[in-house]
Image (cartoon, grey):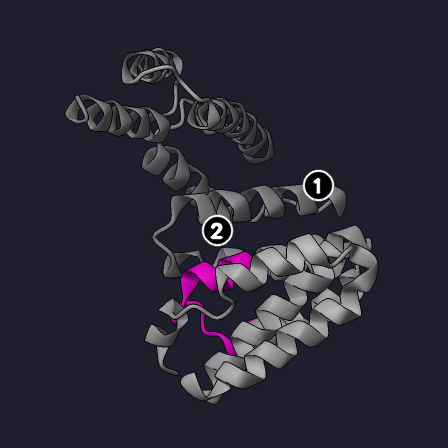
């Protein structure tokens, strides 16, 4: 498998915009046909296995967005069966996360838990701490839904996420700790998004917003990000 091909653009921004703007959800089959038609024109650029993975990812997302979860599962399963996690961790953990959510939404919790366990077992293949956090949150949710114990072998991953992202939580009960981490992450991610999306009068106002955020935020990763934005704004003067 030529992993470098995953860096190539599969669907151009113009086509993605057209799909979201010009096709209502009821026209899902028209969306699917447009994706397939475009993919057929560019298939020569990709090895066969990479092409199938990227096409099934896009078709699965299309079905997912339309609420066709069972059909989306079929596409996402093909991706996971074909794609080694170390070949492209970004695609792998995106798709397996959607596979977990689709199975959860159709109340197939046992199957969803199987996929969540697979994701957890493959976390050594990613350096993205937020992928690790997302997998932990999904797994904790599913062991709760299915009344299963939290596997001992996964508990060290909680401390790994705490240390890598700089969360203030201390590991006690694994499910409660993950719930607390998720709430903390959601709160400060939302606040950061609000700052990023706000139109400020000048750099000084924007810098002040990031400074206040950095002083208040208890999460190391977000504080560091705010610090980088502050330095960028200083250099713009």
The secondary structure making up most of the magenta span is helix
- Where's residue 225, x and y in %? 31, 30
Q: Which residues are magenta?
A: 80-95
Mark 2 Cα-neighbour bin, 10 Å: few <14, some 14–19, many ≥20: few
* Mark 2 touches mark 1? (CB < 8 Å): no
In the image, taking residue 63 as reference, residue 130 lies left or right, namely left
- Where's residue 232, x and y in %? 22, 29
Front residue of 61 and 25: 25
| Point 73% across, 59% down: residue | 23
- Residue 93 among those drawn in magenta: yes
Cα distance between the residues tagged 2 and 1: 17 Å
Q: Residue 106's image quarter?
A: bottom right
| Point 59% across, 30% down: residue | 179
- Where's residue 52, x and y in %? 55, 81
Residue 100 visible (yes or no): no
- Where's residue 115, x and y in %? 62, 61
The local secondary structure at tag 1 comes to: helix
Front residue of 10 and 60: 10
Front residue of 219 and 33: 33
In the image, taking residue 141 as reference, residue 29 lies left or right, namely right
Which residue has dot 1 on it? 144
| Point 67% across, 73% down: residue | 34
Q: Is residue 138 above or below residue 15?
A: above
| Point 71% across, 67% down: residue | 31
- Give the quarter of the figure containing the C terminus: top left
Mark 1 Cα-neighbour bin, 10 Å: few <14, some 14–19, many ≥20: few
- Give the quarter of the figure containing the N terminus: bottom left
- Residue 82 among those drawn in magenta: yes
The local secondary structure at tag 2 comes to: helix
Residue 153: which numbered mark, if any? 2
């Amino acid at each position: 498998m030529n992993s470098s091909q995953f860096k190539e653009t599969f669907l151009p921004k113009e086509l993605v915009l057209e799909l979201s703007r010009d096709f209502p959800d009821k026209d899902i089959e028209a969306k699917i046909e447009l994706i397939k038609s475009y993919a057929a024109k560019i298939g020569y650029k990709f090895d066969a296995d990479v092409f199938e993975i990227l096409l099934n990812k896009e078709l699965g997302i299309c079905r997912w967005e339309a609420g066709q979860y069972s059909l989306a599962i079929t596409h996402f399963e093909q991706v996971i069966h074909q794609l080694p996690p170390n070949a492209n961790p970004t695609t792998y953990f995106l798709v397996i996360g959607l596979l977990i959510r689709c199975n959860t939404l159709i109340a197939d919790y046992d199957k969803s838990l199987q996929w969540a366990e697979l994701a957890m077992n493959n976390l050594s293949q990613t350096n993205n701490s937020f992928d690790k956090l997302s997998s932990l949150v999904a797994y904790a949710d599913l062991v709760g839904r299915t009344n299963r114990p939290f596997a001992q072998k996964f508990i060290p991953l909680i401390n790994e996420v705490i240390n890598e992202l700089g969360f203030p939580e201390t590991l006690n009960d694994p499910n409660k700790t993950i719930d607390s981490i998720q709430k903390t992450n959601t709160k400060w991610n939302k606040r950061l998004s609000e700052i990023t999306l706000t139109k400020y009068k000048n750099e000084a106002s924007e810098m002040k917003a990031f400074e206040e955020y950095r002083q208040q935020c208890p999460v190391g990763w977000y504080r560091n990000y705010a610090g980088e934005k502050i330095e960028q704004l200083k250099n713009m003067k």
